[in-house]
Image (cartoon, rainbow, N blue to C red):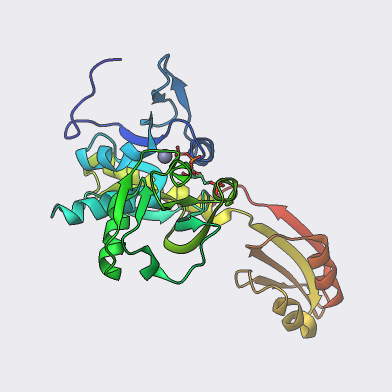
């Protein structure tokens, strides 16, 4: 691989995603559905974009905010928790914002929770006074403790935080919870949520200019198109004019429908984009309300 070009002269867009772990696969799948594909290099940490000048960097998620801050990449797919931790650190150090959340991506949902040993009776945040709390999110935790007026010791660990109480390194933990299985397996239970998180598209504080900026805008439009259509289906049906209001009452998750009058009849042909899942039960309810000739069609692409 040739040495990387400095951000100012680089004309190809770069997106950093998680190399391995929970966000890696869905991140790739999302980008692929936007029409991107890559020639994988042998080191597999840099993937050269073939269909568009958009390259992929496979990195540790915790490194993504820093890479955005330094202009090494233009976009990143990362948990809001990681971005928020970096923002809290920069705020505490008096540094300006370096990366920002552009929009949420609808996967990788989790919470940053404080969890205590099962055996404790939970009496509220004041109970954490004087305790040791293990976390990989020291800046978010410290800021929260400070705002609550709680003086606790923050024990910084880079992984396997949940085991710290059993090892006597800490009394409680502050860590990500998704299914809750890791906490339960370590006899801990969540009592407070510091942050609701999910995967987000993150961009540098200042979007790139020129051709790279236009490329970024194009990609953002495609991603928003893909997200908008997630689970969406085109629904087509006919109904007597008088029964249309009843049918539409059953479609609160649909766009305003396009309606066409069928020649010389009191029947309308309707089509609308539905956001929610179109189960057999829903179709039967729609039929009951007066819809006929129901058809559910997949929607492949949309561009606003
Ligand atoms: C996260 C987190 C917890 C676990 C929670 O770790 O740090 O340990 O997942 O998930 P659960 O509630 O579904 O059990 P992850 O596997 O992402 O590894 P990492 O902490 O090393 O990034
Ligand atoms: Zn991680």
Q: Please tell me which residue is depicted at 46% across the width and 71% down the height of the picture.
A: 123
User: Could you tell me which quadrant the N terminus lies in?
Assistant: top left
Seen in the picture, residue 124 relative to 215 is either above or below; the reply is below
The percent coordinates of residue 67 (x first, y second) are 27, 37
251 horizontally vs 63: left or right: right
Q: Is residue 114 above or below residue 26?
A: below
Residue in the picture at 81% in, 78% down: 264
- Give coordinates of residue 192: x percent, y percent: 45, 64
Which of the pair 18/285 is nearer the observer? 18
Name, please, the residue furthest toward the bottom.
242
Q: Is residue 114 left or right of residue 266?
A: left
- The residue under the point 38% across, 51% down is 81
**Image label count:** 0
| Nearest the eye: 247 or 115 | 115
Between residues 121 and 156, which one lies in front from this camera angle? 121
Query: Looking at the image, which is closer to me, 215 or 59?
Result: 59
Residue 19 in view of the camera: yes
Res. 279 image quadrant = bottom right
Residue 40 image position (x, y, % from top left): 45, 20
* Residue 100 seen in the figure: no
């Amino acid at each position: 691989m040739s040495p990387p070009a400095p951000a100012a002269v680089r004309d190809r867009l770069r997106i950093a995603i998680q190399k391995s772990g929970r966000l890696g696969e869905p991140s790739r799948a999302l980008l692929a559905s936007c029409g991107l594909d890559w020639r994988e290099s042998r080191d597999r940490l840099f993937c050269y974009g073939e269909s568009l000048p958009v390259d992929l960097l496979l990195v540790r998620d915790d490194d993504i905010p820093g890479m955005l801050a330094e202009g090494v990449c233009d976009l990143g797919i990362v948990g809001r928790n990681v971005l928020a931790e970096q923002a809290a650190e920069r705020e505490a150090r008096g540094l300006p914002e370096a990366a920002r959340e552009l929009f949420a991506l609808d996967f990788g949902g989790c919470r940053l929770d404080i969890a205590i040993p099962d055996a404790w009776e939970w009496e509220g945040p004041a109970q954490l006074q004087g305790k040791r709390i293990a976390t990989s999110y020291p800046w978010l935790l410290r800021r929260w403790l400070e705002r609550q007026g709680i003086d606790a010791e923050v024990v910084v660990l880079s992984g396997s935080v949940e085991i710290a109480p059993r090892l006597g390194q800490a009394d409680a933990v502050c860590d990500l919870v998704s299914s809750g299985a890791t906490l339960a397996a370590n006899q801990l239970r969540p009592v407070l949520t510091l942050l609701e998180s999910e995967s987000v598209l993150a961009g540098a504080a200042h979007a790139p200019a020129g051709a790279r900026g236009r490329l970024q805008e194009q990609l953002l439009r495609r991603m928003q198109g893909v997200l908008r259509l997630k689970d969406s289906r085109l629904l087509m049906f006919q109904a007597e004019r008088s029964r249309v209001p009843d049918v539409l009452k059953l479609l609160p998750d649909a766009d305003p429908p396009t309606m066409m009058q069928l020649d010389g009849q009191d029947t309308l042909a309707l089509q609308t984009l539905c956001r929610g899942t179109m189960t057999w039960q829903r179709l039967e309810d729609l039929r009951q309300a007066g819809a006929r000739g129901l058809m559910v069609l997949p929607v492949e692409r949309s561009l606003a």
